[in-house]
Image: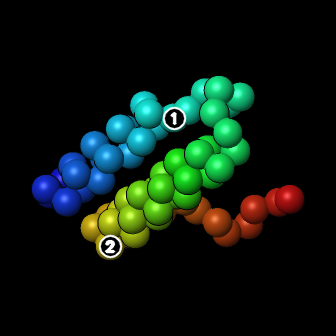
Amino acid sequence: MDKQGYSLLRQLASDVEGAPYPGSIGKELYTIWYEHVQRTAQEALAYLDEHDPDNRPKTENIDF
């Protein structure tokens, strides 16, 4: 993993570690935190798609 990958991993760990406890903060602050974490997660998934395309989940023949 390169420097960008480690940076994204550290950011995700930090975001999850800093997650607010439900009920301890207002909905607005939770929404801000959640949107921030979602952006970081999307960046991490885009990084993985670019650098490890063979490690995607298999989506063929899934029975719902």
37 horizontally vs 48: left or right: right
Which is more toward the observer, 10 or 24?
Answer: 24
At 32% across and 73% down in the image, what residue appears?
50
Residue at label 1? Answer: 19
Which is more toward the observer, 38 or 46?
Answer: 38
Secondary structure at numbered mark 1: loop
Quarter of the image with the C terminus in it: bottom right
Q: Residue furthest right?
A: 64
Q: Residues within 10 Å of mark 2 (few under 14, many from 20)?
A: few
Give the number of callouts.
2
Which is more toward the observer, 38 or 4?
Answer: 38
For marks 1 and 2, give the CA distance.
Answer: 28 Å
Secondary structure at numbered mark 2: helix
Which is more toward the observer, 8 or 21?
Answer: 21
Q: Residues within 10 Å of mark 1 (few under 14, many from 20)?
A: few
Residue at label 2? Answer: 50
In this view, the mark in front (1 or 2): 1
Q: Residue furthest bottom?
A: 50
Q: Position of residue 35 (x, y in %)?
A: 55, 58
Q: Residue furthest left?
A: 3
18 horizontally vs 9: left or right: right
Q: Position of residue 5 (x, y in %)?
A: 24, 56
